[in-house]
Image (tube, rainbow, N blue to C red):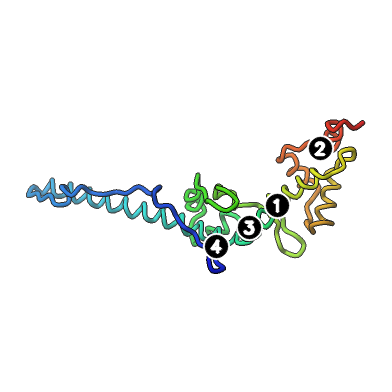
Amino acid sequence: MRKDGDWKISFYKWHSPTIEVSESYKNLQVDDKQAADFLKEKYNQVNWLQQAIKFRGNTLENVIEKMVEKQRMYFEHGTFMLQPLTLKEIAGELDMHISTVSRAISNKYIQTKHGVIPLRFFLQPGIKQKDGQATASFVIKQLMMELIKNENKQKPLSDQAIKNQLQQEFGINAARRTVMKYREQLGIAASTKRKRDSGGK
């Protein structure tokens, strides 16, 4: 949610379990040392578990806030402004281990104006451009889909032609083998096959 020019994040707390000790045990007085030591050990375990749950929740909130900060252009302008982002980058800026960040976002989702999206969606590899900037692979794939969708069905675009149009129209410098890899990942056939499928000779 955007408010006063900044993106505001609200977190649902219902997913975090609440650990409480029964009042009868809290007020239990025992004279036996063994029983007292046992209760003390269990109180410590409950306290440790409460702290662990709190830490996990704080970790997730910090990671989401950093992701939103890094993907601000996506939230303001849409899919084509998605930025390359890695677990290593997030972990480094939060001074966390990569595995900690990975566990925190596993099977977690964020509700946005674009729908409910898995957090891992915001972690995108990218292709570095000559000016030092990088373009997210997801964005390149979306542009490729648009080019193929609007191509001349009698003269479908080859991978080289797609590479050329990405450069000419969008300033994206992608290798032809990268274009081929992305096309295959999208489940789109090669130009010769697309021509046959469209009824071309």
Residue ranking furthest to the bottom: 4
Question: How far apart, in angstroms, are the residues tagged by discs 4 and 1?
Answer: 23 Å
Q: Which residue is mark 2?
A: 190
Question: How far apart, in angstroms, are the residues tagged by discs 2 and 1?
Answer: 20 Å
| Disc 2 to disc 3: CB gap under 8 Å | no
Q: Which residue is mark 4?
A: 2
* Mark found first going from the N terminus, 2 or 3: 3
Q: Amino acid at mark 1?
A: Val
Q: Which residue is mark 3?
A: 74
Q: Secondary structure at mark 1?
A: helix
Residue ranking furthest to the left: 31
Q: Secondary structure at mark 2?
A: loop
Residue 158 lies, in percent from the top left, at: 85, 43
Q: Which residue is mark 1?
A: 139
| Disc 4 to disc 2: CB gap under 8 Å | no
What residue lies at 36% left-to-right and 53% top-to-bottom? Answer: 52
* Mark found first going from the N terminus, 3 or 1: 3
Using a 10 Å C-alpha cutoff, classify the residue at mark 3 as few (fewer than 14 neighbours), some (14 to 19) or many (20 or more). some
